[in-house]
Image (tube, rainbow, N blue to C red):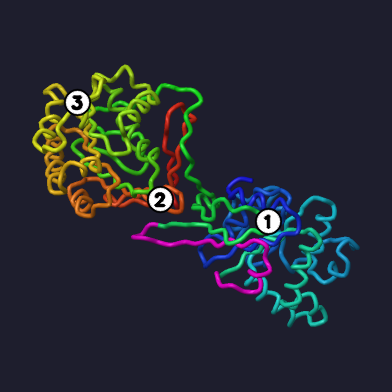
């Protein structure tokens, strides 16, 4: 089942379960239930006429078979009498009788109701209109009769406005809460699995987005070594044009002379840190442009060699210099005295000659914390910023140290400031300078090398 957590999919494979989808207005309850209708061919959707009309008007992607499984709760529908559900069959509206006929025929097993509050209000008016059928439309009786359907093996998915505990949330076998919040103009959305009786909840909170009128669950996947290595395809770097980052080009533009700060939270997995850096490094090297890396703590020498292999960079190592505090056998490693600020500056500057245009310099400032004071680190960053501006290259500052002084300084001197956060196991990126919306990040190696997939959270 697409666009739903595996726990929900497993839960709805059972018979006679009640799933409550709750949340405040605007959290995406209707879109989630419609996505479920679209994905589950053995389900149908019952709603008040106002909701029914809104769905047909606002969600044109819902078509064909899915539209045929959309019903009005008090609409007139054909049905045949059934003994399978006993007297319960006669205590429900015609829409439900028609639905139960389909259940008996084996065509559906899940009824989706949207939304509980709207349905209850509609039923109150029907009680006044049709007093002789009060036993069908009385909200309390309807609730009891509805729950009894689960005893007959029918699955129920009910959306409800609000997050407070009530009889419905107690009776339901499963409860999920949709949340939406805004930070500095950026939208974030999450689905919290509160309970699913009989199902192991391996992940209790999922991020999601509403794209093109559809709900989509997003999961930050773990890195897997590619099954087959393929050549990393370069993009040309030319004077007078934007510099491709190879990662964030859909939302951020790099230009000559830019200083870029990648601000990673401590709990971002190493693979995400490296995959945010390596495509840019690989592209510079494959354009035969000098690339100097003072690696962050996530990038030791063994990891660097592994990344060289993954991105097929063996033929381009003459353009790479790794500034390292210890002597190593590799020709691309340049040893520097990390305790001496002057030596660091001279080593980096000495790696670039007059013929090197547009050099890339990457500074892992968290590694420097073991050797230099915060003031010395800021001096080094400022020196490299001016050096890169003169050369028309690119400076990337990256690391995972939660040192506020360095981050404030980096935010002040950077032209681009990207923030990376871990929210309940999902990796999120957004631009502070310039401002961008929030993006969910995942990682894939299906192209033969690590690659970040960005999805905008709407």
Relative to 374, is 389 above or below?
above
The residue lying at 13 percent from left, 29 percent from top is: 347
Q: In this view, does 103 lie to the left or right of 202?
A: right
CA gap, disc 2 and disc 3: 34 Å
Q: Name the residue under label 1.
A: 198
Q: Is residue 239 left or right of residue 280?
A: left
Nearer-the-camera pick, 367 or 449: 367
Helix, strand or loop for disc 1: loop
Q: Is residue 304 one of those drawn in magenta?
A: no
The mark nearer the N terminus, 2 or 3, is 3
| Pointer 2 local density, CA inside 10 Å: few below 14, some 14–19, many at least 20 | some
**Quarter of the figure with the C terminus:** bottom left
The mark nearer the N terminus, 1 or 3, is 1
The residue lying at 40 percent from left, 26 percent from top is: 310
The residue lying at 38 percent from left, 25 percent from top is: 311
Residue 274, image x and y in percent? 35, 36
Q: Is residue 238 left or right of residue 122?
A: left
Q: Is residue 6 left or right of residue 155?
A: left
Q: Name the residue under label 2.
A: 422
The numbered disc on residue 334 is 3
CA gap, disc 1 and disc 2: 29 Å
Q: Is residue 171 one of those drawn in magenta?
A: yes
- Quick one: which residue is furthest to the left in this view? 342
Which contiguous range is marked in magenta? 163-186
């Amino acid at each position: 089942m697409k666009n739903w957590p595996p726990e929900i999919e497993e839960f709805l494979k059972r018979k006679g379960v009640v799933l409550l989808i709750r949340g405040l207005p605007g959290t995406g309850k209707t879109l989630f239930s419609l996505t479920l209708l679209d994905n589950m061919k053995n389900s149908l959707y019952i709603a008040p006429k106002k909701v029914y009309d809104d769905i047909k008007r606002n969600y044109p992607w819902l078509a064909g078979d899915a539209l045929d499984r959309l019903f009005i709760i008090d609409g007139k529908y054909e049905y045949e009498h059934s003994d399978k559900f006993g007297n319960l069959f006669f205590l429900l509206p015609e829409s439900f009788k028609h639905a139960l006929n389909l259940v008996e025929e084996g065509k559906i097993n899940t009824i989706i109701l949207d939304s509980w509050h709207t349905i209850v209000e509609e039923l109150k008016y029907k009680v006044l209109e049709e007093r002789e059928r009060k036993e069908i439309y009385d909200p309390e009786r309807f609730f009891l009769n509805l729950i009894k359907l689960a005893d007959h093996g029918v699955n129920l998915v009910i959306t409800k406005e609000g997050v407070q505990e009530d009889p419905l949330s107690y009776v339901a076998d499963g409860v999920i809460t949709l949340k939406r919040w805004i930070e500095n103009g950026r939208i974030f959305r999450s689905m919290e699995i509160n309970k699913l009786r009989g199902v192991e909840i391996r992940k209790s909170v999922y991020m999601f987005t509403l794209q093109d009128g559809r709900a989509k669950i997003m999961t930050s996947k773990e890195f897997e070594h590619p099954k087959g290595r393929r050549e990393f395809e370069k993009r040309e770097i030319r004077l007078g044009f934007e510099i491709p980052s190879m990662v964030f080009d859909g939302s951020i533009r790099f230009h000559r002379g830019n200083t870029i700060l990648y601000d990673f939270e401590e709990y971002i997995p190493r693979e995400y840190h490296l995959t945010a850096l390596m495509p840019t490094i690989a592209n510079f090297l494959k354009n035969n442009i000098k690339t100097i890396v003072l690696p962050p703590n996530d990038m030791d020498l063994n990891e660097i060699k592994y990344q060289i292999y993954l991105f097929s960079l063996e033929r381009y190592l003459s353009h790479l210099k790794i500034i390292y505090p210890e002597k190593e056998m590799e020709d691309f490693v340049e040893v520097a005295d990390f305790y001496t600020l002057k030596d660091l500056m001279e080593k980096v500057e000495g790696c670039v000659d007059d013929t090197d245009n547009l050099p890339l310099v990457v500074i892992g400032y968290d590694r420097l914390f073991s050797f230099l004071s915060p003031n010395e680190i800021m001096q080094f960053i400022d020196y490299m910023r001016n050096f890169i501006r003169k050369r028309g290259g690119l400076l990337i500052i990256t690391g995972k140290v939660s040192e506020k002084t360095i981050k404030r300084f980096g935010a002040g001197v950077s032209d681009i400031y990207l923030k990376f956060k871990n929210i309940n196991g999902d990796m999120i990126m957004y631009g502070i300078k310039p401002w961008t919306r929030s993006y969910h990040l995942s990682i894939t190696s299906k192209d033969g090398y690590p690659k970040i997939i960005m999805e905008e959270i709407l």
